Image: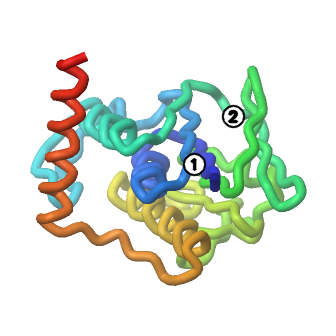
Amino acid sequence: MTHVAVVGGGPAGLSAALFTAKNGLATTVFDTDGTWLHSAHLFNYLGVNSVDGESFLSVARDQVDDVGAERREAEVTDVTETDGAFEVTTDEETHVADYVILATGADRDLATALGCETDDDGVVTVDVTMETSVSGAYATGAMVRAEEWQAVISAGDGAAAALNVLTREKGEHFHDFDTPADAEAAMAAVVDEAETDDAD
């Protein structure tokens, strides 16, 4: 199964993981829980009137867990490209992934070590899909912009990266567009699962 490694568990990383896992790709999120959202309060996130960063993170993590992504609390120390795949190294082990989505905020060290091109200011260069100069490697959020560090922008970057991965995997432009009927079916599945767990 295609495996996507997401490095970072803030808005960009969780958004990317939501899209890839929801659509059938094995997804692992590596996170040190260092996101600046812990000290944020969102009044400027479209569709959200007011929410503190901790609550936003809790809901986002639950969403990602519910669609089957695996979240690991681990610091990624290196990402290398080997034979068309990526080796993601933590303090304890190495994982192999078909794609890597970097979502480490303004920390660009992993992207630089991987050989991703940067501009004169050290900002990682990406195309509109958030893909870097290294095929299959994506960079999101603050690492691809000098100053525009907003949760909603980062979440959009994560979604763009994930949709491009899905487009490549499906072999055609992929759209993740849900309808009210989809939501009803998803809720029915959640209820069925809860009733099954209670019966056990």
Q: Is residue 44 visible?
A: yes
Q: Secondary structure at mark 1?
A: loop
34 vs 71, nearest the viewer: 71
Closest to the camera, between mark 2 and mark 1, is 2
Q: In the displayed structure, would residue 103 be above or below residue 145?
A: above
| Residue 94 numbered tag | none
Q: Residues within 10 Å of mark 1 (few under 14, many from 20)?
A: some
199 vs 171, nearest the viewer: 199
Location of residue 135 by image quarter: bottom right
Q: Residue at x 43, y 46 (%)?
A: 14
Q: In the displayed structure, would residue 196 be above or below residue 19?
A: above
Residue 13 as seen in the image, left or right of residue 56:
right
Of all residues, the one furthest to the right in this rendering is 83
Give amino acid for label 2.
Answer: Val
Q: Is residue 120 visible?
A: no
Of all residues, the one furthest to the front in this rendering is 199
Residue holding disc 2: 76
- Residue 28 drawn at (x, y percent): 57, 40
- Residue 61 drawn at (x, y percent): 36, 36
177 vs 123, nearest the viewer: 177
Location of residue 79 by image quarter: top right
- Which circle's residue, 2 or 1, is located before the other in the chain? 2
Check if mark 2's residue and mark 1's residue have beta carbons within 8 Å: no
- Residue 103 drawn at (x, y percent): 55, 49
Q: Residue at x 71, y 49 (%)?
A: 97
| Residue 106 numbered tag | 1
Give amino acid for label 1.
Answer: Ala
